[in-house]
Image (spheres, helix red, strand yellow):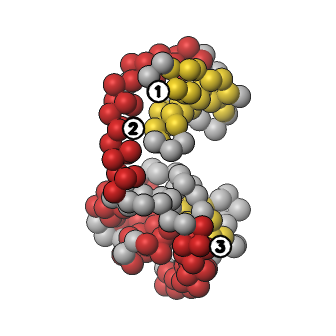
Amino acid sequence: MEKTYNDPDIGEVILRKGRGYKRITLRVSARHGVTVSMPWFVPYREGLAMFLAKKGWVLETIERQKKRFKEEPVPTSEEVEAMRLEAKRILPQRLAELAGKYSFEYNQVRIKHNVSNWGSCSRKGNINLNLNLVRVPEDLRDYVILHALCHLRHPNHGPDFHALLESLCPGHRAKERELRRYRLF
């Protein structure tokens, strides 16, 4: 369920409810707009109040993102297709290597062009990897793959998940921070 709030300074703000949301979250994207996600039982006015309380931060974030987009040109559709082909050649093979090395079993691997995540793991044991991973250094690529594989054993971000990920990828928190320097196209 969604409602739209038209802010005079920002424009459309999407207020989205869903059963999968555990708390109110605010997402800002210079290209895709502002979204407030909230559990289905939370009134829309609470999500809107959170947005309004953080509006200054939202405006700063949008400006920062716009500057960054000017510095990094968006790839053409031909460049994206070339990345897709390279990703399909490299990523499934590396996933299989790391899964074998650490005794993980997964169902399928899919290469996707997401703008919101680098990789994911479904409850059915399917691994999704973002084609943008071909643009990052190998150690960060391996971090994303290991992160997804660890979700096969721990489908959350609890202490057991982080302990497993740290044992397979020492310094994983630093790698997570470093990955934030790269953006998804």
Residue found 59% across the figure and 73% down from its top: 78
Q: Give the foreground label among 3 and 1.
A: 1
Q: Give the foreground label among 2 and 3.
A: 2
Binning the other alpha carbons within 10 Å of mark 3 as few (below 14), some (14 to 19) or many (20 upward) gives: some
Q: CA distance from mark 1 to mark 2?
A: 9 Å
Q: What number of labels is visible?
A: 3
Left or right placement of residue 87 versus residue 160 in this view: right
Q: Secondary structure at mark 1?
A: loop
Q: Which mark is residue 62?
A: 2
Residue 80 point in image, percent of width and height:
57, 70
- On the rendered image, what quadrant is the N terminus found in? top right
Left or right placement of residue 46 versus residue 55 in this view: right
From the viewer's side, name the closer residue of 60 and 181: 60
Q: Secondary structure at mark 2?
A: helix
Residue 33 point in image, percent of width and height:
52, 37
Q: Which residue is mark 3?
A: 109
Q: CA distance from mark 2 to mark 3?
A: 34 Å
Q: CA distance from mark 3 to mark 1?
A: 38 Å
Residue found 43% across the figure and 72% down from its top: 135
Q: Which residue is mark 1?
A: 10
Quarter of the figure with residue 113: bottom right
Under mark 1, the amino acid is Ile
Residue 11 point in image, percent of width and height:
52, 26
Q: Is residue 155 visible?
A: yes
Binning the other alpha carbons within 10 Å of mark 1 as few (below 14), some (14 to 19) or many (20 upward) gives: some
